[in-house]
Image (spheres, helix red, strand yellow):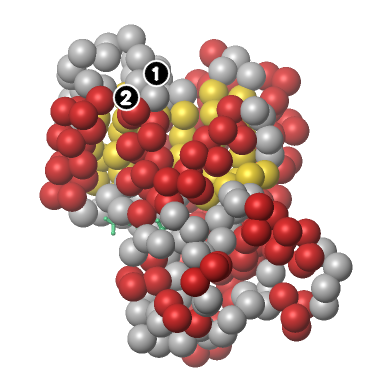
Amino acid sequence: MNTPAQGPSATASTALITGATAGLGAEFARQLAEQGHNVVLVARDEARLRASAADLENRYGVRAEVLRADLADDGGVAAVVERLSDPARPVEILVNNAGMGLLRSFADNDIAEEKRHLRLHVQTAMELTHAALQGMLQRRSGRVINVASVAAFLPRETYSAAKAWLLSFSRWANLAYAGRGVKVTAVCPGFTHTEFHDRMGMDKTVAPRWMWLQADQVVREGLADNEKGKAVSIPSKRYKILTAATRVLPARLVAGPPRRAK
Ligand SMILES: NC(=O)c1ccc[n+]([C@@H]2O[C@H](COP(=O)([O-])OP(=O)(O)OC[C@H]3O[C@@H](n4cnc5c(N)ncnc54)[C@H](OP(=O)(O)O)[C@@H]3O)[C@@H](O)[C@H]2O)c1
């Protein structure tokens, strides 16, 4: 359901953030609102989206729309494509952030689950970027942030494969469209404290404490790198070093800690 925009910031630019109810998406919405952008919050939990929208409007004086959509579903994606394609309400910043993890290994998963996972991370991000780019290229201005992962550099299940697609897509799109005013960045966080691992039922102690990042740092660095026009953002020095090491070390060594149920 779409709430008509209203409020004090009729002239500010608008950012649409997917997966805005929790974790990195909620933090992207907060920091973008703090910077003065109006926001369109997209996810499945409408009550949570409404509470976040009210909070952002009160705290930062921006307009916050709510768009409830399941982004692993054709109908949900179509609703967001429609919003992104409305020339009367241009979206200047798109953050493709909604995501999920799968605890079990590929061959043990139900194929329907794997298809939803691939749809959400890859096809949805591709379709939403395509829709957003039409207006951005016409206006010769826009920003797209694709939340990938350091997993994009590692051999870790179909999650890595999906995030590697986002990374490769962002690298190419940034090259292709920078000259036409559109900056595209893959933000590649390492382990970050959000709801992600609890939702997938993963025991968070498999990764040592030093490997965990805070969402506000990831988002601050990701937004700054996108503003600078960087195609890839790897938040924190420790993950920049780890990612560089993945280019020279054998796959077996860089696969990272195995997943374990809570
Ligand atoms: N946390 C990490 O360690 C980490 C590391 C690297 C990359 N990432 C990536 O960061 C992104 C955000 O994850 P997070 O860590 O912030 O996880 P999170 O706290 O679990 O938040 C995930 C968000 O995605 C939304 N979402 C999930 N499935 C959806 C669907 N089918 N349709 C619409 N929205 C959906 C959820 O909202 P609803 O449930 O309300 O729909 C929620 O807002 C993901 O792409 C993830 O792969 C996370």
Image spot of residue 242 (x, y percent):
71, 64
- Image quadrant where residue 205 sits: bottom left
Of 82 and 190, the residue lying toward us? 190
Give amino acid for label 1. Ser
Q: Seen from this angle, which residue lies furthest top?
A: 11
- The answer, for residue 119, to whether it is visible in the render is no
Of 222 and 38, the residue lying toward us? 222
Image spot of residue 169 (x, y percent):
67, 47
Left or right position of 260 against 166:
left
- Image quadrant where residue 211 sits: bottom right
Q: How crowded is mark 2: few (under 14 residues within 10 Å), some or many (20 or more)?
A: many
Q: What element carries label 1?
A: loop
Query: Residue at horizontal 75%, vertical 83%?
Result: 252
Spatial distance from mark 2 to mark 1, Cα to Cα? 6 Å
Q: Are marks 2 and 1 in contact (CB under 8 Å)?
A: yes
Residue occupied by mark 1: 13
Of 236 and 187, the residue lying toward us? 236
Left or right position of 70 against 219:
left
Q: In which quarter of the image is the C terminus?
A: bottom left
Q: What element carries label 2?
A: strand
Query: Residue at horizontal 77%, vertical 67%?
Result: 246
Query: On screen, 70 above or below 34?
Result: below
Give amino acid for label 2. Asn
Q: How crowded is mark 1: few (under 14 residues within 10 Å), some or many (20 or more)?
A: some
Query: On screen, 64 above or below 166?
Result: above
Query: On screen, 246 above or below 167?
Result: below
Residue occupied by mark 2: 38
Q: Earlier in the sequence, mark 2 or mark 1?
A: 1
Image spot of residue 78 (x, y percent):
36, 43
The residue at label 1 has a CB less than 8 Å from ligand 1: no
Left or right position of 107 against 64:
right
